[in-house]
Image: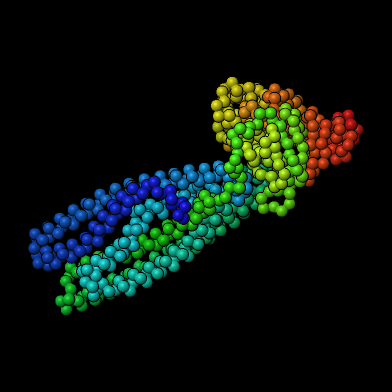
Amino acid sequence: MKYIFSDLLPYRIHIIIAWSLMLVELAVELMLPFFLGKMIDEGIMNQEMSNIIFWGSIMLGLAMLSFAAGITNSFFAAHTTFQFGYDVRQRLFNKVQAFSFKNLNEYPTSALITRFTNDVRQVQNGIFMALRIMLRAPLMVLGGVIMAFVVNWRIALIFLVTVPTLLFFLFWVLRKGSKLFEQVQARLDNVNRVMQENLSGIRLIKAFLRKNHEEERFVDANTGLMRDTKSSLRLIETSMPVLLLVMNLSLLFILWFGNIEVQNDNAAVGDIVAIVNYALRVSMAISMFGFLTMAFARAKASAERLENVMKADIDLLEADDASDQKRIQLGKVEFSNVSFRYPGLKVDVLEEISFTAKPKEKIAIIGATGSGKSSLFQLIPRLYDVHKGTIFLDGHDVKSMKLDHLRRAIGFVPQAPLLFTGSIHNNIAWGKNDATREEVIQAAKDAQIHETVMNLPNGYETKIGQKGVNLSGGQKQRVSIARALIRNPKILMLDDSTSALDLQTEQKLLDAIENYQCTTMIVTQKITTAKNADRILLLDDGRLIAEGTHKELMQHSEMYQKIVTSQFGKEEAYEH
């Protein structure tokens, strides 16, 4: 928790002011019953109006001071709380941006969203209550007991029994409640995950008539959240009657024993009124402990969840000796005995891969599903690090290069095109910070999407829905390709990114790419695409089993022959 709350250090002056004002409020509240007792004994009991006015004026002035202190305290508490939340979300966002793919696998999107929203809010609530009443409540208990002893120590002895008992009980509730609220946050993660998956796949759910199944999944997740939330809140709410019962019993004892003391002239009526007021204030403060305990338990659980993300080790970092001089100028790609396995797995998905892609060469990569094609692509921009072997770009080990320089020279189009909410222009220009309108249009033309865009009502200003829901698969692919081309990359990687394009459009696209003078690597399932490449890499079960031109592979690779036959049939296979 210390790590998270270190973000409060810049606001220590605000915190000191807030606590100082809270102490002013507290001091006034502790003095008012004492002065009330004085007014009763010296004014009301003696029928001295001057004393009543004197003590009443003092109490009124103190009440106004307490009001002003409370208003100002709320301002500083709110300012500190919301600034803290802003800083934590910013630091959390920056941390997530630095995550490797391994880290992102450990923290699902739904869990991160819960941390950005609900967890930060719970910590904010805890801080606000700490600056307003969390310290005030225990200090009120302590101060009320001390002032009761100042007024009449014999009657105040009851506090020595009730207060320690209640504090011990509340400590037990806090420990148990903290664990329960941690489970609640985990359940909330699960509900968010189910909702996210459902909303993302709503079209598929409707197509497969899986509405009832998804409802059952949500009911299960929602029921778990409700059950754990009820358990935690039931614990907190049960503590309230216990607190009030004990304090009400102590009030009855004060009135009973105080009456005896007044009759024996060992106490004044004002003393009894003052001690009853202190007992009521202590009772009110202790009754707040239930709410405070709940808030602190939730804040503690949320702070620990935030801290887990903040302290997560990022496994993919730049080397200390990474050089600015090592940049991609030509686009030569070399794999030297590269093996790779995903974090947490014991089996390599790529084994002993070695090949060289010359500058401006067009390389096609084919193979069955699960053969490691996409995994190979992810190693080039260091989205993952190799398990064994080395990848060289223009003769430089990728691990010795600055990540910014490395990735800025690469145009990467993933297998599933991802577009952002906004205009088509913004989605294409997203690939280059300072892209001009002319560059956007040229990239769109080369990606064979310009005419489609111009036929839309608002052209390049047409708004794209979330993940491009209002575009077809082929349109999304071409916008994604335009976004990569606008970078004018030295290495262009297309991960099965032309699968939704017809042959004529795909050929025009590949011809336009020739003008970019970049090394092009294409993952494809189409032989018609692969045969036009300078070289073809054939992967099977994570191994490179054949390499060469279409003609060479047709002569020497039995597996390649089977792939061609499966697409064109035996009679036409050798014609292609």
Whether residue 496 is visible here, answered yes or no, is no
Nearest the viewer among 503 and 342 is: 342
Quarter of the image where the C terminus is located: top right
- Tell me what residue is drawn at x 21 percent, y 51 percent: 64
| Camera-nearest residue between 146 and 384 | 384
Please indicate whether residue 124 sits to the left or right of residue 220 in the image.
left
Q: Position of residue 182 (x, y in %)?
A: 51, 58
Q: Residue furthest right?
A: 571
Query: Of 71 and 97, which appears nearest the observer?
Result: 97
Q: Give x and y (percent) for residue 226.
A: 52, 58
Q: Is residue 283 above or below residue 107?
A: below
Q: Identify the residue shown where x is 50% and y is 61%.
A: 180
The number of numbered badges drawn on the structure is 0
230 or 413: nearer the viewer: 413
Residue farthest to the front, as pictured: 321
- Relative to 448, say whether 570 is above or below: below
Task: Note whether residue 60 is visible.
Answer: yes
Q: Is residue 138 left or right of residue 98?
A: left
Q: Is residue 512 left or right of residue 246?
A: right
Residue 287 x/y as whole percent: 35, 63
| Spot occupied by residue 373 in the image (x, y as percentages of width and height) | 74, 40
Q: How is the image coloured?
A: rainbow
Q: Measuring 80% from the left and 38% from the top, which residue is drawn there?
A: 538
Question: Which residue is found at the position 60% from the left and 24% from the top?
Answer: 440
